[in-house]
Image: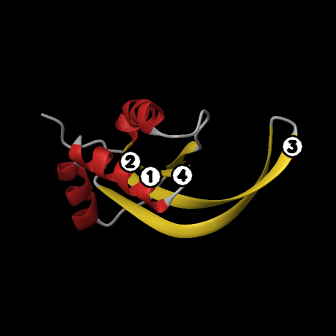
Amino acid sequence: MPMIFVYITTATPDEARAIGRTLIDERLAACVNIIGAMTSIYRWEGAITEDQETIMIVKTRAELFNDLASRVREIHSYRVPCIVEIPLGRIEGGYLGWLTAETART
């Protein structure tokens, strides 16, 4: 069963926690890692912008990406949030079993 990481950025750690808890509660993810403040420099609506953001690394099944992305867009503060799938290679068997069990949607 293919597993992925999903890279998401948020405006604040609190927003990342709220999104992460939602994804875990709804079994769209097995685990969410939240990494503190980073500086992002980007062009938005014609201007170069610099902001502090929080990184989320979401561990889930590849088949759940579309549902996960849709749910994140519903609750995210950004009009165009960064939601990027990162395919994974090999995963240790025990960890793969845990990821599979925690994302089982009945």
Residue 2 lies, with reference to residue 34, above or below; the image says above
Q: In which quarter of the view is residue 90 placed?
A: bottom left
Q: Are marks 2 and 4 in contact (CB under 8 Å)?
A: yes
In the rendered structure, the answer to whether residue 84 lies left or right of residue 74 reads: right
In this view, the residue in front, 39 or 106, is 39
Instruction: Identify the element where label 2 is drawn.
Output: helix
Q: In which quarter of the view is residue 98 placed?
A: bottom left
Q: Earlier in the sequence, mark 3 or mark 4?
A: 4
Q: Are marks 4 and 1 in contact (CB under 8 Å)?
A: yes
Which of the two marks, 2 or 3, is nearer to us in this view? Answer: 3
Q: Position of residue 21 (x, y in %)?
A: 29, 52
Number of callouts = 4
Query: Label 3 to label 4, Cα distance in Å?
Result: 19 Å
Q: Residues within 10 Å of mark 3 (few under 14, many from 20)?
A: few
Quadrant for the C terminus in the image: top left
User: Residue 15, labelled with which disc?
Assistant: 1
Q: Are marks 1 and 2 in contact (CB under 8 Å)?
A: yes
Query: Label 4 to label 1, Cα distance in Å?
Result: 6 Å
Instruction: Identify the element where label 1 is drawn.
Output: helix
Query: Label 1 to label 2, Cα distance in Å?
Result: 6 Å
Return the residue at label 3: 47
Instruction: Identify the element where label 3 is drawn.
Output: strand
Q: Earlier in the sequence, mark 2 or mark 4?
A: 4
Q: Earlier in the sequence, mark 4 or mark 1?
A: 4
Q: Give, as a three-letter code, the residue at label 3.
A: Ala
Return the residue at label 4: 10
